[in-house]
Image: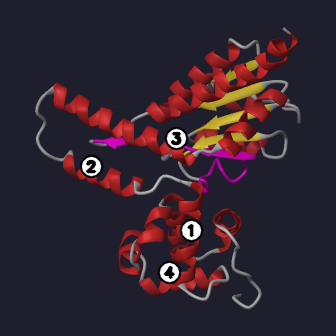
Amino acid sequence: MNETVSAPSDLDEFLTAIRERYDELSDRLQRIARHVLEEPNDMAFETLAVIAERSKVQPSAIVRFAQAFGFSGANPMQRLIREGLLREDRSLGYAERIRQHRYAATGDLEGPRHLLSEFVEGNILALENLNHALGQRELSEAIDLLDRARTVFIAGFRRSFPVASYLAYLLAQTDKRIVLVDGVAGLHLQQTGGLEASDLIVAISFAPYSSETISLVEAAAGSCPIISITDSVIGPIAKNASLVLQVRESEVRGFRSLAASMCLAQSLAIGFAARKAEPTLAAS
């Protein structure tokens, strides 16, 4: 395999190759692939021993992973990731800061005020990561898809439902044709029946992913564009998506927040509203 695969020239090319080839990798190599996609700062700056421990593989597996993608070894792969992170000013150290925050938050509760501080600090970390992780290209592409769509179907169940309903509410204020797929009586697939190529689905789900959202995305694949708002670019609702917007929420004492997801929903809706207002402002 190594003789026929050329090493990627930059980080984006490498991440794209991982996503495209993920399903063909062995279980051990898939663990490393997930770690590269979800914790790139680890792969860039930690030792092989630390990466292996966090990925639950042997260090030799990391070398095999690098060679499978055309690198001569782990060091050139780490160098490419490191240079890409620094060049693109991506968020560095988020995973480690989250780990430190969780460790610091394991003491006894000191009342509601202490608990509030924990959630606030965790959400600040998640919002800072969102601010660095999503760039101009992803957000502009999402707004382009919203702008071109005849009807926007928005689906999110269980923990994701507040995000879906909030995004639907905001977009409805712009007079965009919106359908909130709420799945009442288990009719989520019927609510998206008759999809056309000019429509758009916005699917929102985080681990553990809801079966309703997964089945909806699988049924809609190929019918119209799909924007997936999720926590993993290789998750079950990301594979068939036209665009993946990755959001990594904070988790405090086992409870995960929605602050970053709500912020993203607000940014998309207001960005779309501003896009619609541009011709009017130019005419005046």
Q: In what element is the residue under mark 3?
A: helix
Q: Residues within 10 Å of mark 1 (few under 14, many from 20)?
A: some
Identify the residue at image location x=55%, y=48%: 133
Whichever of callouts 4 and 1 sits on the residue coming sooner in the sequence is 4
C-beta proximity under 8 Å, tags 1 and 2: no
Q: Give the residue type at disc 4.
A: Ile
**Above or below 32: residue 218:** above
Which residue is under mark 3? 131
Q: Give the residue type at disc 3.
A: Asn
Q: In what element is the residue under mark 2?
A: helix
Q: Residues within 10 Å of mark 4 (few under 14, many from 20)?
A: many
Q: Is residue 62 visible?
A: yes
- The CA span between labels 4 and 1 is 19 Å
Left or right: residue 58 compared with residue 275: left
- Kindly report which numbered mark, 1 or 2, lies closer to the viewer in this rendering: 1
Which residue is under mark 2? 102
Q: Give the residue type at disc 2.
A: Arg
**Magenta range:** 233-252
Which residue is under mark 1? 83
Q: Nearer the viewer, residue 92 or 213?
A: 92
